[in-house]
Amino acid sequence: MKKRIFSAAVIVLLAGLLWGVYYLNALLPVITGYPAKYLCSAVFISHRSASEAEAVDLRFSFIQYVKNEINYRDKTVTSRFLWGRSKAIYRDGFGCTLLREVEEDSLMKVHFPGVARANYDPDTVAWPLGNIIPDTTTGIDKVALAGIGEKLITENAYNGNAFGFIVIHKGIPVTERYKPGFNEKTRFLSWSMAKSFTNAMVGIMVKDGKLDISQKVAIEAWQNDDRKNITMNNLMQMESGLRWNEDYGNLSDVTLMLYDQKDFAGYAINMPQKFPAGSHWYYSSGSANIINYLMRKRFREDAAYYAFAQTRLFYKTGMPSAILEVDPAGTQVGSSYVYATARDYARFGLLYLQDGIFNGERILPPGWVDYTTTPAKHSNGCYGSLFWLNRTHYYSDAPEDLFSCNGHDGQRIFIIPSKDLIVVILGYSPRPDHDMNFNRLLKDVLKTLNHSKHGNLN
């Protein structure tokens, strides 16, 4: 009897060990892929110190135990943990890409198209297209705002860890602060704020007559089942009905897509239908990458596709240094990977605050911002079209008309039309230990409006 019990215990123990090894092996592409990709972009796009990025942004979970090797000559990062290994490479124009089911030599043969440079130098051109900022009184208390910036950046008074902070009032930058090591030239990672850039690119293509968001999307793999009923609008409002797990804390669809796949959109396209299209809301980075794949298909050649974001969006809105990275299959990662300066993100907010017009030119079609801020039917008022909404007063001390671009780890562009206000916060503020108190920050910023004396920041 004792022998049977012992044998059974050994079998259970071995089964547990085998399952643990199997699960860990499945996790290794994420454990090594995340730091390889993140550090590659941090070093070669944001020009951050590798040791600083590792100490601040990569000090969590298994990621903190990964060994990262940076080759500054080849502009690559190789990350190792146990028997796992991942490598990311930097290419001009494309940013950094993980090697997944593709050889490094093959990727290096693909070059970003020779897009003509913007016909202006931002440092010699007036705001908003350039960086010469007017000294204009807007009715906001700049001294109080400076105090807020000091508390946010230097004291971490709003919790979290902000790297950059900028406020735009009546179209003019009225305060701007950065942590040491960051400045107005630093490109910051958007994370999911990139989805709102996808919204803008779709809007431009709609304006050009190249897309109709009400039509069912023509994806061959969907034509023999209920997925054939999904429209571009369903994807943009996160109501496609495709099965998806957006949990960044485990082995989920979003982590597998970003760190273990060659074709991000293809991974999402292969998801089965869980709900009828347009009947259920839930957040999905996969949907945003399907949209970028569909946009890519509208171009006859990739050179025109890659030039599109640069010439039609970035150059037109004063963001010539912005980078939209691609997956190993070459599709732009419109779910997660824009790199731009704090001023660039503020300019992007200004585009939407001004109803799709920037520097006197209409970039987005008439009515596009209204469409963008119309709640998705089943989102309970929290989501429009690739933008978050405040209809449910999630930010209880901010106006209901606030809408925002939200990114992982605390990236935000808050747009408040009723106050003619944009608030940008960038940094590394992950949950649960360092969750930024955005509501209190917004409350304090709003107190500085229409005050001639210092606002009360208590």
Image (tube, rainbow, N blue to C red):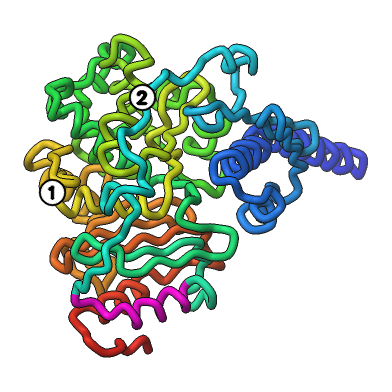
Amino acid type, callout 1: Asp
Instruction: Tell me if I can see residue 402 in this picture.
Output: no
Q: Nearer the viewer, residue 279 or 457?
A: 457
* Residue at image location 36% in from the left, 60% down from the top: 424
Residue 86 drawn above or below residue 196: above
Amino acid type, callout 2: Ala
Q: Nearer the viewer, residue 234 or 327?
A: 327
Badge 2 crowding class, 10 Å Cα cut-off, few under 14, some 14 to 19, many 20 or more, is few
Q: Is residue 148 magenta?
A: yes
Residue 6 drawn above or below residue 55: above
Which residue bears the numbered disc 1? 355
- Apparent side of residue 383 relative to residue 289 in the rendered image (left or right): left
Identify the disc placed on residue 116. Answer: 2
Q: Nearer the viewer, residue 282 or 443?
A: 443
- Apparent side of residue 91 relative to residue 397 in the rendered image (left or right): right
- Region rendered in magenta: 139-152
Where residue 171 appears, x then y in whole percent? Answer: 21, 60
